[in-house]
Image (cartoon, rainbow, N blue to C red):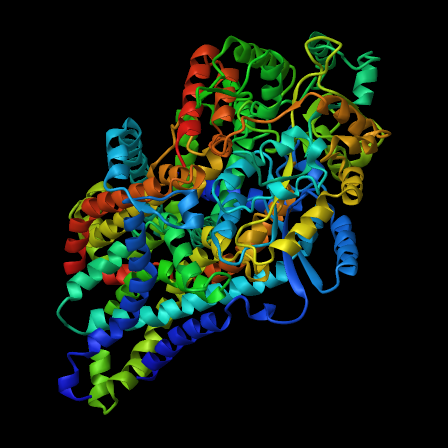
Amino acid sequence: MRNRILALAAVFALAACGAAEEPGQQQAAGPVKLTVWIMDGSVTQELLKKFETEYEAAHQGVDLDIQIQAWDGIGERVTAALASTDAPDVIEVGNTQVAQYSASGGVSDLSAKVADLKGEDWLPGLAQPGKIDGKQYGIPWYAANRVVVYNKDLFKAAGITEPPKTRDEWIEVTEKLNKGGNQGIYLTGQTWYALAGFVWDEGGDLAVQEGGKWKGALDTPQALAGMDYYQRLQALGKGPKDADEANPPQHEVFAQGKVGQIIAVPGIAARVLEVDDKLKDKMGFFPIPGKTADKPGTVFTGGSDLIIPVASQRQEQAYEVVKALAGEQFQTELAKAMSFVPNRTSLAGVLAGDEGTAAMAVGAANGRATPNTPNWAAVEATSVIKQYMTAVLTGGDPAAEGKKVSESITTTLNSGS
Amino acid sequence: MPARNRSLWPYLLIAPTVAGGAFLLLYPLLKAAVISFQHFRMGELIRGGAVFAGLENYTELLTGAEFWQVLLRTVVWTAINVVLIVVLGTGIALMLPRLRRGLRLALMSALALAWATPIIAATTVFQWLFQSELGVVNWVLVTLGLDQFQGYTWFADGTATFAVLVILVVWQSVPFAALTLYAGLTTIPVELFESARIDGGTGWQVFWKVTFPMLRQLFALIAALEVIWVAKCFPQIWVLSQGGPDGATTTLPVYAFKVARVLHRYDLGSAVAMLTVLILAVALISNLRRMVRS
Amino acid sequence: MLNAAAVAVLVTTIFPVYWMFLTAFKPTRDIQSDTPTFWPAHPTLDHFVTAINAPGFWTYWRNSLLVTVGAVLIALVVAMLAAFAVTRMSWRGKGAFVVAVFAAQMAPWEALLVPVFIIARDTQLLDSLAMLTGVYFMITLPFTIVTLRGFLAAIPVELEEAAQVDGCSRLTAFRRVVFPLLAPGLMATSLFGFITAWNEFAFVNVLIIKDQDRRTLPVWLSSFRDVFGTDWGATMAAASLFALPALLLFLFLQRRVGTGMTAGAVKG
C-alpha cells in the first residue's frame, strides 16, 4: 500500500510543483527584467558586460538579462519563443532567417520607428530581408562579408608581391601557391556563399521571381559559369569536396601554416591565432577579386537583424534596448571589437585603419543578399545547394545537377505558408 | 486483503500508467492527429486559428511520388540494419562464452562503452572517421594499398553515405542485441548442448536444433525492438547527411522532420507521423500479440 | 581464429570511443593533422577546462541529474505497479493493456514535439522542469514496463505465497521477498531510461525557453559551435564528460543488464 501511495504522491508532487512555478509572478514588483537573446560568437563577453552595465545605469529600474544562444536548434527555439505567451523581449536572428519569422505574424511591426533609428542609410542587405509587404520587422544590426585571408610567408615564398585584382590573376596566383605540400587555397566543396558571389558576378542568381512565382536559377548559363569557376579554384587545394567550411573549421586547417588562402570573414583571424599563434602578423587580406580589375567581386552580405516578438510583454522597453544596440555608440564599439560592418553606411569610417576590415569594406560596396522570400531559410536548412556543389565537384554533370537543384529550390520557395 | 476488492486491484495498479499515458502520450497523439487534418503551419503555430483542411494533407502525401520512395527506402534501411544487427549480435553472443575470461570481459566492456556513448558524440566521431582528406578510414585504406580511397568522398555518393550510416547504426545497436542474447544463452542448461553434441551434431546443427528454439522468444523480441528503433532512427541521419545526397538517406522520420520543422509544414509532418505509426503497427501488431500471449 | 575474430570485434567496437577520448586530450592544432596520430603526443587538459568553464555547466548538470533521476525513478515505481498487475494477477483487458504498452514504444516522439509544446504552453508549463520530467518519464515508461515484466516473471510466485502463508500481507511479502530479488533488475532497467533521458535534446530545446537556468546538459554539449564551426576538442571533452555517468553506471551494472528480458522471454 505504501508503495502505491508513494508513487501517487510523487506524481502529484510533480504536477503541483509545476503549477507553483507559473511565469509572471516575479514580474509583479522590483526592476523590469528584459530578456535579450544574442547568438554565440556575435559579441564578446566583455562588450556585452559593458553594454549591460551602461544600459542599466542609464535606465533606472531595468534589469537586462542577456542570454547567449547556442547555434544548434536555434530555429526551433526562436519559433517556440515566438509562439509562447511570454517571449524574450529582443532576439537576434540571421538576415537570411528574418523574413521567415516576420512573415509568421509573431514579430512586432517597427515601421513607425525607422526614422527614429536613422534607417535612411541602413545596409540594404540587412534592411531588405527584415521588410515584408512594406513593413519593417527586422532592425539591421551588423553585417560581415567574406574576404580572402592569405598567408604572407607563402605568398613571399612563391614570389607573389601583389594580391590578385581579377579572377584570372587569382587562379594564376593560386596555382603558384599550390606546390610542394602547400595548398593554394583551402576551399571546401560546400562553401556556397562563395559560389553565390561568383554566380552574381556572371550575372546569374540563386533564384528569381517571375510573375509572383519563384524559380530556382542555378541551371542558367550564368550560374553554371559561376560554378565552373568555383570548381577550377577549388581544385587548387585539398578542401574536402563533401563538407563545408565549418567542418572541420577552416581556421584550424589554415593555422597549420600550409594553406595559402581561405575565404572567410576577417574576424576569423582571431580564431586562427587562438589555435596557434605562429601566424601572428603573417595574415594578409584582400577583397574577393572580380571579373575585371576595376570592380571587386560581388559578395554575400551576411549578418543579423534584431526583432521584438509580439509575445514580448514589454514592447516599449524592448524597443529602447533595440535602439541602444542599433545606435551609433554601440555600433562603433561592435564593429571595432568584432571586425563587423556597422548597420549604417555612414558609420563605415570605423573600418578604416585595419587591413582586414578595410578589405571587407571594399567588398561590402558590392554586397548582396539571398533571395528575399520567407521560404529561403528552408532552402538553406535542407542543404540542397551544398549537395549540388558536391555532386558537380565529384564528377556529376553540371547541367543535369543544376537542373535538379533548381527544381528543388523552386518547389521549396513556392510552398505556401 | 478482502477478496471482494481483489478485482479492483489490478486496475488501481495500472492507473498511474494509464493516467500518464493518457495525458502525455494519447493527448498529444490526438492533437497531432487533429493537426494532420488541418492547415497548420508556422503562422498557425504562432497566431493560432488553424482551419480544417479535410484529407488535403493525406492526399498530397499519398499522391506524390516522394512519400512512396521514402517508404520503400525506409523498409530497405530497416531490413538491412535489423538483419545485420541480429546476425552480428548472435555471432558475438555465441562467441563470448567460448573466450578466455580476460578477453571476454574486455569485449563485453567494449560493447558497453559503445552502447553508452551519446548518440551525438558517436555520430560526430563517425563523421570524422569518414572525412575525405583527414579521416582515419581513408588513411587506413590507403595505407593498406587501396589507393583509390585517397581523398575518397564518402558523403558525396548516396550509396556510400547510406553504407556509412548503416555501419554507424549497426555499431550502436549490436551491443544491446549481443549482450541480451549472451545473457539468454547463459540460461540454457549445459546438458542440452552436451547431449546434442554426443548425438553427433555439428556446431551449426546445435545452433538450429537447440539454441535457436530455446531462444526463439528472445530473438523475436529483439528483432521487434530493433525494427522499431531502426525505423525511427533520426539524429544520426540528420547530423551526417540531412537525408542527402539527393535524398538517398531520407527515411520516414527524416522526411517528417524536413517537412515539419524545416519547411514548417506541421500539418503535413503530422500526417507523415500518423502514417508511420499505422504502418509500424500493421507490421508488428500480430507479432506482438503472439509474443504477449505466450 | 576465434580469438582473432574476438580481437577484431573488440577493436572495431572500441575504436570510435577511443577516438572521442583521444581527441579530447589533443591540442587543437593536432586535431586536424594530415596523418592521424593514434596516441596523444602532447596531451592537454585545455578542452576539459573550456568545457567545464562554459556558462551554466553546473546548473545544467544539476538540472540534468534532477530531471533524469526524477523521470527514471517515477517510471520505475509506476512500471513496477503495472508489471506486478500484469505478472501476478489475472484480469479483463490485460492482453490489450500489454499490447498497448508495447505499441507505445512506437510513439513518434519527434512528431509529438509540436503538440506537446502547445499543451505545455496552454497549461502554463513552459520553462518547467516538471513538464520535462513528465515527458521523459513517458518516453521511458513503456520500455521499463516491458523489461520489469520480464524480471518479475522470472521470480517464482511460490516465494511470495510461502511468505503469505507465514502470515505476511501480500504487500509485505512483495517487499520482503520479491523486492530484494528484483533490485538488480530495477537497476539494470533504470539504465535504459537513464541513457534515453540523459541524451534528450529536442524537447528541452523547445520546452525551456525564457528561463535558461532550467536547461539541461545536452544543450551544453551542443554549445561549442558558432559561425566559424565547431570547437571539436571542447565538444569531444564535453562528450567524454557527458558519457561518463552513463558509462560508469553501465560498467557497474553490466552483468545484470539483459537478464530481465531473457528471463521473461525464455520462461515464456
Residue at (21% x, 70% y) in the render: C87
Residue at (28% x, 80% y) in the render: C174
Measured as percent of width and height from the top left, residue A111 is found at 61, 41
Residue at (18% x, 58% y) in the render: B292
Q: Nearer the viewer, residue A366 or A138?
A: A138
Q: Nearer the viewer, residue B49 or A6?
A: B49
Q: Is residue B282 above or below residue A392?
A: below
State left or right for residue A186 relative to residue B49. right
State left or right for residue A248 relative to residue C42. left
Measured as percent of width and height from the top left, residue C242 is found at 55, 54
Measured as percent of width and height from the top left, residue C108 is found at 33, 49
Q: Nearer the viewer, residue B34 or C104?
A: B34
Residue located farthest toward the bottom when viewing the structure as drawn:
C167
State left or right for residue A65 relative to residue B221. right
Residue A80 visible somewhere in the drawing: yes
Residue B117 visible somewhere in the drawing: no
Q: Quadrant of the C terminus of chain A?
A: top left
